[in-house]
Amino acid sequence: MTLRQERSSVSRRLAYVVISVVFTGYLANAFMYVVQGGPTPVRIVTSLACLLTIGYLQLGVFSRPNVDLRSARAYLALGVEALLAFVPVPFFPNAWGGMPGFLAGSVLLVLPARVRWFVFAAVALANGMTKIAYESLPIGGYYAASSTVVGLVVFGLSRLPSLVEQLETARSEVADLAVARERLRFARDLHDLLGFSLSAISLKAELARTLVGNHTDRALRELAQILDIAREALTDARAVASSYRELSLTDELDSARSVLAAAGVAATIEGPPAELVPSARTVLATVLREGVTNLLRHSDATRCSITISRAGRMVSIEIVNDGAPAQARTDRGSGLANLAARTAALGGALHAQPATDGTFRLHSQVPAAPTPREAPADEPHPPGPQIATRFAQVLLTAVVIGYGVMLTLLAADDYDQVGVAGITTAVTSSAVIAVLVLGVVSRPQGPPNQALGYAALAGLAVCVYVPPFVFDNPYFSGVPGFLAGSAALLLPRRLNWAVFVAVVAAQGVIFDVLGEDWVQVGYGFISTTNHGLVLYALTRLRSMVTELHEARAELATAAVTRERLRFARDLHDMLGYSLSAISLKSELAHRLATTDPQRARQELTEVVDTARRALVDVRSVAHSYRELSLREEIRSAQALLAAAGIDAAVRIDGCDDLPTGIEATLATVLREGVTNLLQHSTAERCEIVLSRSPDLVTIDIVNDGCPSTAAEFRDGSGLADLTARVQEHGGELQAGPTPEHTFRLRAEIPSR
C-alpha cells in the first residue's frame, strides 16, 4: 500500500469509527431517556425500531465511504430519516432531541449546494421550536445549537476523508502537470536550439561534398561554417542538458578558479552567500560556467573578477574581465540567450556588454528565495487545497464555539439558581476553552513547545472541574470532552488514551457526586466521550489536509527534478556522440580537402549521414515529449475539479483512435481550459463534452463561474497559443461568455 493509499484509508477509518461511536452514544442516551419516561413494551419496541432505523440510514448510507449521495436511494433515505427525526417527538419528547442533528448533517451531505444550508438551518430551527413547546426558551435554543453542532460534525467527519483523498489525487495531478510542462519545454529547447543547426549541417555537408575537388576554396568555407555550427550546437546541447541538472555553485567556483589559473588569467573571487534555493543556485552556477567559457574562447583577458553578492531578496553574480570581445553574442540560439531566458523565468535579469573602461561585464541577478506567494506564471494553482484547508478550519471553529454556546444556554436555563455570576462564569469558561483549543491544542503543527501544551491542559482542567463544585451543578463543567480530546492529542502515545478514559470516568463520577440520577450519569459518560472524539478526529483530519497542502510544492519539485535528470541523460546519450563525431569528421575533411579530395568526400558523406540520424532523433524525441494523452488529461481534470469542490460532468462520445496530433491538441485545450477555470472563475459546476462527427471533433468546456469579461480570461491564459495549435489542424477555437451566463471554451478540429 502506498503512503497516499494508507493516509486516505486512515482518514476514512478514523472518521467512520468516530461517527459510529458518537452516533451509538446518541442512540444509547436517547434510549435511556425512553426507559426513564416509562419502560412499557410498546415504547421500548417502537423507540428501538426508530432508533435502529436511523442508525442504519446514518451509518449504512449517509456516512458510509464511497456511497453515491446524489442517487435516488440517498434522497429516499433522507426523506425516511426526516420522518423518523420529527414524527416520534410528541411520543418521546425528552429522548428525541439529538436525532434532528443527524438529519441536519445528512442534509448537508445529500442536497445540492444551493439549497443545503437553507434546509440545514430549517432543521435546526425546527428542532429548537419543538423543544420550546415542551421546555423553556433557553432549552429550545440549546437544542437548536445542538442540531447545528451535531450536523456540522456529521458533515465534517463524512466530508473531510474524501477531501483528504481528493487532495492526495490533486497533489499528484499538480506534480504531473509540472512534469508535463517541463516535457514541453524540453521539446521546445530541442527543436529551437538543435533542429535548425542539424538541418544546416546536413545541407552544408552535402554542398561541400559536391564542391571538394572542383571548387576547393568554397568547400573549405562551407566546412569552416559546418565546424562553427557543430561546435555551437554541441555547446547548446550541453547548456540545455546542464539546465536540467541541479548544479553546485561552490563546485563551479572552484572549477572557474582552476581553469582561469591554468589559462594564465588572474582571478579574484568573492562569494557565494549562504542558503540559496536550488533554482537560484543552479542558474548562477550556469551563468558562471558560461561566462568563464566565453572569456576563454572569445577574449584575450589577463584579469577577471567574479563577485557573488546578495541585496535584499535578490542575489547577483558579476563577471568582469579586461579582454572585451568586439561584440557580445546574445543572438538566438547562443548560450547567453538561453541564460537570459532562464533568469527571466525566475524573475531575474541578465546583461552582457562591454564597459566604457574597456572591460567586459556579465551581470545576472535572480531571487535568492521565492516569496510566500511567488510562483511561475504557468504553474497551476487549483483552489481545492485552499478550500479544503479553509473548510477544515471553519468547521472546527464552528464546532468549538457551538459547544460553548450550548453551555451558556444551559446556564441561562438555570438562571434562578446560578444568577448573573453563573452565566458570567459559563461565558468566560467557554471563551477560555475556545481560545485554548483553537489557539494551542488544534494547531496543525501542534503547540509551539511542550510546556505550552501542558499549560493548555491545565487551563482546560480548571475550566472543567472548578465551576461544577462552585455552583453545585455538573452542567457547569465546561466541555469536559475537550479536555479528554486535548489529552489524546497532546500527551505521549502510551499516556494519552489512558488520560482520555480517566477524564470520561471522572465526569460520570462528578454527575453522581452532585446528586444526578443514573440517566444523567450516563449522559456525562457519553457526552464526554463524544465531544473528546469529535475534537480529536476533526483536529487530526484538519492536520492531514494542511500537511497535504503544504507538501504540494515539494511533491511537484521532486517530480520535476526526476524528469529533468532523465531529460539531461536522454540529451547526452542521443546527441553528445553525434555532434562530437560531426565536429571531428568535419575537421578531418577540412584538412583532407586539398590533399585527398576523395577521402574528404567520404568523411563528408558520413557527416551527412550522422547529421540526418541526429535530426531524426531530435524530431522523434521532441515529438514524444510533446505527446499528451487525452484520457489522462480528462482524469486529471476530474481530480482537480473535485478537489476544488466543483461538480464536474464529463461526456465522451466516440473519440477513440484520434490522430496523435489532434489528440494532443485537444488534451492541451482541456488542460488550459481547466487551469483557467480554477484560476479565474468562481465556478460551482463544469461540463466537459467531447463529441465526434464523421468530419469534425469538438470539445466544449462550460462553467457557471463566468469572468466579468472575455479579456479577464485571456490575460495570461495562453489563449493565443491554443488558437495557433488548433489552427494548425485546420480548426477553430472560441472562448467567451454565453447568453446563459456561463463561460464556454470550444475547439473544433477536422477529424481527418
Image (spheres, rainbow, N blue to C red):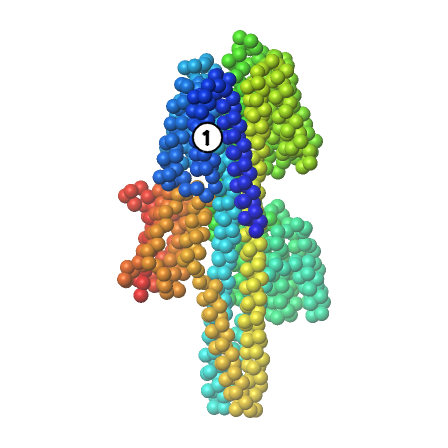
Q: Position of residue 435 (x, y in %)?
A: 59, 26
| Residue at the extreme front of the image, as rendered | 41
| Residue at the extreme top of the image, as rendered | 416
Q: Secondary structure at mark 1?
A: helix
In this view, the residue in front, 276 or 747, is: 747
* Residue that label 1 marks: 52
In this view, the residue in front, 728 or 503, is: 503
Q: Position of residue 248 (x, y in %)?
A: 65, 59
Q: Residue at x 56, y 25 (%)?
A: 526
Note whether 181 is above or below 114 in the view shown. Answer: below
Q: Residue at x 55, y 76 (%)?
A: 578
Quadrant housing residue 78? top left
Note whether 750 is above or below 316 in the view shown. Answer: below
- 72 left or right of 399? left
- 496 left or right of 24? right
Q: Residue at x 61, y 50 (%)?
A: 368
In this view, the residue in front, 17 or 287, is: 17
Q: Position of residue 528 (x, y in %)?
A: 58, 25
Quadrant housing residue 130? top left
Q: Residue at x 61, y 59 (%)?
A: 246
Q: Position of residue 8 (x, y in %)?
A: 53, 45
Amino acid on which the number 1 mark rests in the picture? Leu
- 440 left or right of 33? right
Q: Is residue 128 visible from the viewing direction of this image?
A: no
In this view, the residue in front, 395 or 45, is: 45
Task: Say which quadrant the C terminus sits in.
Answer: bottom left
